[in-house]
Image (cartoon, rainbow, N blue to C red):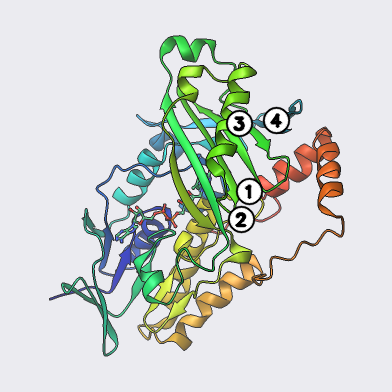
Amino acid sequence: MERRDAVIVGGGPAGSTLARALSAAGAAVTVLDKRVFPRDKTCAGWITPAVIRSLELDLDDYRQGRVLQPMHGFSVARMGAAPVRAGHGAAPVSYGIRRCEFDHYLLARSGAQLRAGAAVESLERAGNEWIVNGALRTPLLVGAGGHFCPVARSLGADLGRGESVVGAQEFEVRMSAAQAARSPVRGDTPQLYFCPDLAGYAWVVRKGDWLNVGIGRRGPHRLGEHFERFLAAMVRDGVLDESIARTRAGGHAYLLYPHARRPLIAEGALLIGDAAGLAYPESGEGIRPAVESALLAAEAIRACGGNYSRQSLSRYAQSIENRYGARNLQERDKTALPGRLKQLAAGLLMRSRWFTREIITRRWFLHEHVAPLAA
Ligand SMILES: Cc1cc2nc3c(=O)[nH]c(=O)nc-3n(C[C@H](O)[C@H](O)[C@H](O)COP(=O)(O)OP(=O)(O)OC[C@H]3O[C@@H](n4cnc5c(N)ncnc54)[C@H](O)[C@@H]3O)c2cc1C
């Protein structure tokens, strides 16, 4: 049986970032992913400059043959109301990427051994080691397999039950030259549409000739109906071609940090990224927490000096709490206003350019007030 210093389950942004950090420090790392890369991932695909910094991404290299759409502002509306456009100036505040390209690029440069097309079928604990699929031995098992990560399951996460999930539907489609020419959607200005009940939002994001359209809501109840109503409104308002709105959508679920109940560590194991349930509560952005949790895990792993007891790994759990705060499992609403009044207030605020730019985009979506983590 082959022995590896670490086995990482999942080659998304969390897994590849940790694989790169550990490999650079000289560790023998294997990344196991059930899919063969390049693979699609349901995601709007926008990343902030903080992600680029933390990943040490060379944009000139990245944009060779890949989509990299600079974004300079946002258009924000409550569904049914007129959008407010907020510009953020000359420097890009976000970039649109395609996950099939982005994830493949990060994984390929990680320097780790890759076992693609290999789903995790068994995880056993033997002494101080884990045995993965009866074929790999390791003292350190990392769950980076996204929301349905098998490592999270084996550490006791109650996947799909007792978890307050965000349900999402989305499609990404390449526009024909004629569609691209007549589309009113601008690549530099993603469009966000908040649901009237404030339980989520929909988006229309253009990346070059690619159009990404989706919706995410807390609790997947009647998600399909919400999405269909949104698409019909976009066709009616001339934002989307009818043929584009008929594109088959994919669905996915994930957890927002304050509501996730997943353990972060166990004996010889830890969870990072969506497997740990780390997405930002206001925007659902999960790539930045996926990358950051991987960097925090790398630092904690280095400090363990080869002793991966739960107590030793607890410094990782502590660093996650230091960065993202304590989890709020009660999902308490901090505003004292009753539902309808809150919706009315939000409707009024979303008409304000100041509120849209300073609070919704700068604070909730771009997290500009939080300095990036160094790689
Ligand atoms: C519709 C939608 C839109 C989103 N838009 C954005 C956005 O614009 N910006 C943003 O920052 N975040 C966005 N997110 C969140 C973001 O996609 C995730 O937070 C991010 O992908 C988490 O990265 P990860 O590496 O933890 O997991 P993932 O990217 O999910 O990667 C997990 C990997 O594990 C593999 N895997 C799963 N099960 C197994 C198994 N049994 N064995 C082996 N391998 C396995 C998978 O194949 C996959 O490659 C969006 C999410 C959704 C659903």
Amino acid type, residue under disc 1 in the picture: Ser
Q: Is residue 252 left or right of residue 347?
A: left
Q: Which residue is mark 4?
A: 89
| Few, some or many residues within 10 Å of mark 1 (<14, 14–19, 20+) | some
Q: Which residue is mark 3?
A: 230
Tell me what residue is drawn at x 33 percent, y 76 percent. 140
In this picture, is 305 found above or below 169? below
In this picture, is 10 found above or below 345? below
Q: Earlier in the sequence, mark 4 or mark 3?
A: 4
- The yes-or-no answer for disc 2 within 8 Å of ligand 1 is no
Amino acid type, residue under disc 4 in the picture: Gly
- Label 1 and label 4: CA atoms lie apart by 21 Å
Question: Where residue 191 sits: x, y (%)?
Answer: 63, 30
| Few, some or many residues within 10 Å of mark 3 (<14, 14–19, 20+) | many
Q: Is residue 227 left or right of residue 360?
A: left
- Label 2 and label 3: CA atoms lie apart by 23 Å
Q: Can you tell which mark lies on residue 280?
A: 2
SS assignment at label 2:
loop
Q: Can you tell which mark lies on residue 283?
A: 1
Amino acid type, residue under disc 3 in the picture: Phe
